[in-house]
Image (cartoon, rainbow, N blue to C red):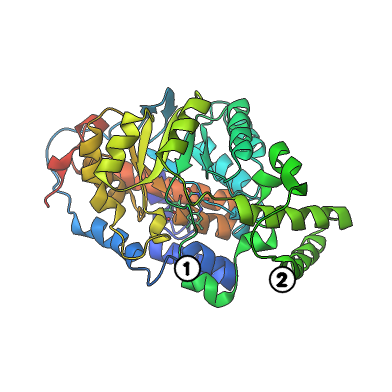
Amino acid sequence: QRIYLEGLWGRKPPVPVHPEGLEEAARRRMSPEAWAYVAGGAGLERTMAANRVAFDRHRLLPRMLRGAKPPALEVALWGRTWAAPLFLAPIGVLELAHPRAELAAARAAAQRGLPFMVSNQSSYPLERVVEAARSVNPEAVVFFQLYHSSDPRVVGSFLRRAEAAGCAGVVLTVDTVQLGWRPRDLDLGHLPFLKGQGLAQYLSDPAFLASLEEPVEGPSLQPRLSLALLRALLALRRAGKRVGVEGLSRLLKGVRRFVATYSFPELSWEEVRQVREATALPLILKGILHPEDAAMAVALGVDGVYVSNHGGRQVDGGVAALEALPGVAEAVGGRVPVLMDSGVRTGTDAVKALALGAKAVGLGRPYVYGLALRGEEGVGAVLDHFLAELELTLALLGVKSLEEVGPHLLAS
Ligand code: FNR
């Protein structure tokens, strides 16, 4: 109501309310390289488009005159309370959008009681992100998202750090054993990691740093890397940060080793089993689309299944995440919570995903756009707009509580 009334008094919201306006404003603000990386998808971006079409295809069927007050939005998942069935999906290299990156986004989420998932490829170490979130809300819920490195020592070290920092769980992303084919980045010849961006988790990790002296397999990237890093170094200096020769050499070695080890193309259920055994934290598998994979995950003892196609950034022509959701939810059969993301843009999208079996939805690109436009305040505004529409839509549908949300709310 506050948001609505402020709007009607002619006060402009901090960032555009309409998702397309938000996107367009961010596009104008961001560099072409940052925009390509964040907004782009795999191949012809057919899966990215399909994610939206799937939401558009489902229609809600409101009930009237049910005497329904706006329902409470809180949900309890993995022993923590979330203010709403909404979380910030893990997104790497947020420094592309704003220098305060994860620190700003995690604070905006924590202030609203929403979980933040810090990416394996983040711009600040996870400890700093947890600290930033806790500084505004001691109960802040932060998950750590893990990519399984080909170096098991780094995997173990990341898990220990997530435990020590008090993360609420580990989200193991399994759809990115290799980076998808992304024409927008390729055409600009740009990948942030090669400039040393998004490596904070690694460059702050004792196991990773200890491995820097070991030989690295694969093509030598040295001459090209040096050039990219020199540019990065100059940018850092312009921003007032001094990085010496030693720092540069460590960065150079770090980038090379990162490229060689950040993923494990042969990843299999065996590693899932190992990660399951290696930590007592709740373990959620992200990137599941096939019902049989979902059933296997539950059989292996994971605590959550996260339906996602990585926002259409991996397999072009792959199924929309929302289309895959009912099959996964059925295979899981309520044994563990199901999360979903990919294409979620509005509060009504969230209702549709909840109706099809998700316990909560992840917001991805839109919060990055808010971050690019206005930092922490921008992320906060995107979240406020989303939550307001979610609450309003449930009330207008005649829903009295989240437990009532189910497929009967959908006309098709
Ligand atoms: C991502 N995503 C992602 N996922 C993950 O597990 N680890 C990561 O580091 C990243 N990094 C990342 C960077 C960028 C720029 C984007 C857009 C996405 C995927 C993310 O968690 C989520 O699945 C998608 O963003 C959902 O799609 P939409 O809703 O953003 O279109």
Q: Residue at the spot x=53%, y=70% of the render?
A: 185
**Disc 1, ligand 1: is the CB inside 8 Å?**
no
Q: Quadrant of residue 320?
A: bottom left
The N terminus lies in quadrant: top left
Closer to the chain start, of discs 2 and 1, is: 1
Q: What SS does tag 1 mark?
A: loop
In this image, 294 relative to 22: left or right? Answer: left
Q: What percent of the width, then of the height, locates residue 110?
A: 53, 36
Q: Is residue 401 visible?
A: no
Q: Residue at the spot x=65%, y=44% of the render?
A: 201
Q: What SS does tag 2 mark?
A: helix
Front in this rendered view, residue 352 or 214: 214
Q: Residue at the spot x=41%, y=43% of the render?
A: 286
Q: How many marks?
A: 2
In this image, 186 relative to 56: left or right? Answer: right
Q: What percent of the width, then of the height, locates residue 364?
A: 44, 52
Q: Quadrant of residue 164?
A: top right
366 vs 168: above or below: below
**Disc 2, ligand 1: is the CB inside 8 Å?**
no
369 vs 152: above or below: below
In this image, 43 relative to 231: left or right? Answer: left
Mark 2 closeness class: few <14, some 14–19, many ≥20 residues within 10 Å:
few
Q: Which residue is mark 1?
A: 182
Q: Quadrant of residue 396?
A: top left
Amino acid at circle 1: Arg
Q: What percent of the width, then of the height, locates residue 269?
A: 40, 39
Do callouts 2 and 1 mark residues in contact (Cβ within 8 Å)? no
Tell me the number on the disc at residue 224: 2
Q: Is residue 390 visible?
A: yes
Amino acid at circle 2: Arg
Front in this rendered view, residue 120 or 32: 120
Mark 1 closeness class: few <14, some 14–19, many ≥20 residues within 10 Å:
many
